[in-house]
Image (cartoon, rainbow, N blue to C red):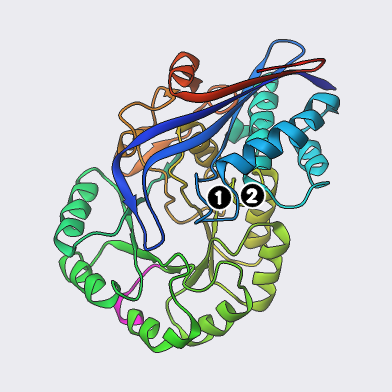
Amino acid sequence: MMKIEKVDLFLTSMKLVQPFRTHQETVTDRESILVKVTDDEGHSGWGEVVAFSSPWYTEETIETAWHMLTEFFIPTIIQGEWKSPQEVNGALLHWKRNQMAKAGIEMAMWDLIAKRAGISLAEYIGGVRKEVEAGVVVSMDSPEVMLSTIENRIKEGYERIKVKIDPANDYQMLKVIRDAYPDIALLVDANSAYTLKDVERLKRLDSLDLLMIEQPLSADDIVEHAELQKVLSTPVCLDESIVSFQDARNAVKLGSCKVMSIKIGRVGGLANAIDIHDLCEEHDIPVWCGGMLETGISRAFHIALASLLNFTIPGDLSASSRYWEKDVIIPEVVVENGKVKVPEGPGIGFEVDETYVKQISKRKATFHAKKKDH
């Protein structure tokens, strides 16, 4: 049994190397909450809350996550005794939703327990790969700029390109890209920009040999995606619609998608992510790791997750330098020949530069088993 003696929170802010644009939001400065848990033997583990500053992706924000962590989740962790991260996941189910806040503290417990076991997180969860394939996201811009960006990413070794689309920028823009790069693995992400009234528009995309279309309809929908998938030959991938294992099971049962994106933060933690992976594997639905403009801490978790057997599509596992002038981990994530090596060191396999984390923190808090300091 293990007790947590201390939890540290760091609300950080980092400027992206270049703004990230979707039809919903443009992100230039990325806030995150980094979570450090320390046990009664002095071992520490790190996690990350990947909620955004405003509720454009899910209902959570950095501020709501901070509230849930400080008032509910951290007291639960400090008061309990733990044998496994799954126990932590079960204890947090007492409260509804707030998946990203839950994931931040749960991830830290996974890192800690893998370190206590002296093995890598990938090995701890049953990973089978020594390296994972990396994809990259190209945000909305003019076709000329996007073509130039794609060319640069291909030169860097990325084997899968994701492009953001909406009804004002879809077929014509994608046709230009496909004509220029007829053989690249190309997928599109709509971030819920369409409705069933746009079926004919979406059916036009079938001619472009896309790997998938991610989250075309409403973020809270599973039923209408099933209707859409019946008339599209392009695989539908669900992202925002899947925030729990039950959502994933419902989507599989209804035939709402042929592919699923798994993000640890979005589904409430690594335990849930693994369960969704296993469910999809059982039903022959390939999965891949989505990205959240996260720091190297969350990215390290997704690298470990992507080492599982059914992650057969390159994920959003870009190099640290794609997003940050300086990441919070040492060494930084590097893509070589389109692949990222799965760390073999204990836990997430990266050292967290805590000095740098403190430098970029806008707010900090420390919680002890017997007292709370701010």
Relative image position of residue 273 (x, y in whole percent): 64, 49
User: Looking at the picture, how far across and down is residue 21, in whole percent?
Assistant: 33, 54
Left or right: 205, with 5 as reference point:
left
| Disc number for residue 263 | 1
What residue is at 31 percent from the left and 81 percent from the top? Answer: 207
User: Is residue 335 part of the magenta span, yes or no?
Assistant: no
Q: Quadrant of residue 327?
A: top left
**First-in-chain label (1 vs 2):** 1
Marking on residue 207: none
Q: Amino acid at mark 2?
A: Ala
| Residue type of the residue flagged with mark 1 | Lys
Q: Residue at x 40, y 38 (%)?
A: 340
Pointer 2 local density, CA inside 10 Å: few below 14, some 14–19, many at least 20: many
What residue is at 81 percent from the left and 20 percent from the top? 3
Discs 1, 2 touching: Cβ within 8 Å: yes
Please say whether residue 208 is one of the residues in the magenta stretch: yes
Q: Which residues are magenta?
A: 206-211
- Mark 2, residue position: 273
Q: Quadrant of residue 346?
A: top right
* Residue 27 in view in this figure: yes
Decide: few, some or many residues near mark 1? Use Cα within 10 Å; few <14, some 14-19, many ≥20: many
